[in-house]
Amino acid sequence: MSPLENYLLALADDALISSQRLGWWISRAPQLEEDVAMANIGLDQLGQARALLTLVGETTGQSEDELAYLRDERDFRNVCLVEREQSDFAVAMTRLLIFSTWQHELYGALTSSSHPTLAAIAAKAVKETAYHADHAAHWVLRLGDGTDESHRRMQAALEAEWPWRDELFDNTFLNEPDLNVAPHDAQLMVDGTAVDPATLREPVERRLGAVLDQATLGVPEPRVVFSKGRDGRHTEVMGYLLSEMQHLHRSHQGDTW
């Protein structure tokens, strides 16, 4: 795929896989209203993924369904952060805070993209992700500065999720991972199409730090994890996630409602 297609796929896959994980919380969230909130956030992310996959398909000739349901694990470019299991509510809120804060900064920058369609997608998404980040921050504050038990669980969730955020700021993923070629990402930055992920670290971590400080949570010590989802190298749970997400479409290819 071209550098632009790789870039768009990465953003689309982030949103698509995060949406799939959030859907698990419907009927499992701690409050009835939270079931609705998680569903709505997941649907927002699904809408972002659909728009970006449709944009990719304009040059590859594939439909959004084909890109979502007929690619294999190694073809997905999402960061490992969004694919990992999140059956603990504290983990889900910590991850949503990190991911949506990053998305909000990213889409805010992409509203000035020289690619008009991408800029239009970003203009809509930046409004959605502002709500997502605010919703997650509300829960992190409520639980982090709550009881001793809720504080302990939020800090444990933060320790578990924090190392996986680094891949969000990796600016090398536009290299073709399976070919010995030079980086292509520089041209996308030069022509104003894309945003260098590395430039998002400072504003994202400043915002996260402010929330954690208010929630009386400590920023974890640096820890290295193997997170190479941008290169198609995923955690072991990704295969199970895709099996569930793609089963119906792969079992009835060509059928329509």
Image (cartoon, grey):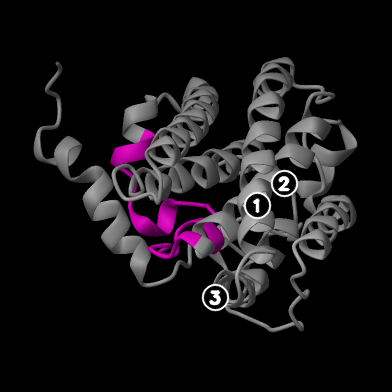
Query: In the visual, does 236 lie left or right of 102?
Result: left
Q: Which residue is mark 3?
A: 149
Under mark 2, the amino acid is Thr
Instruction: Name the residue that disc number 1 marks.
Output: 97
Q: CA distance from mark 3 to mark 1?
A: 20 Å
For badge 1, the amino acid type reads Leu
Residue 249, placed above or below residue 169: above
Image coordinates of residue 64 in percent, x first then y, are 39, 27
Span colored in magenta: 67-89
> What is the secondary structure assignment of the residue under circle 2?
helix
Which of disc 1 and disc 3 is earlier in sequence? 1
| Mark 1–mark 2 CB contact (< 8 Å) | yes
Query: Could you say whether the residue bearing mark 1 is in a helix, strand or loop?
Result: helix
Residue 222 percent coordinates (x, y)? 76, 82
Residue depicted at x 62% and y 72%: 151
Is residue 86 inside the magenta stretch?
yes
Could you tell me how far apart the alpha carbons at marks 1 and 2 are, in whole angstroms?
Answer: 6 Å
Q: Position of residue 76 (x, y in %)?
A: 45, 51
What amino acid type is highlighted by mark number 3? Answer: Glu
- Tag 3 secondary structure: helix
Disc number placed over residue 101 in the picture, else none: 2
Residue 61 numbered mark, or none? none
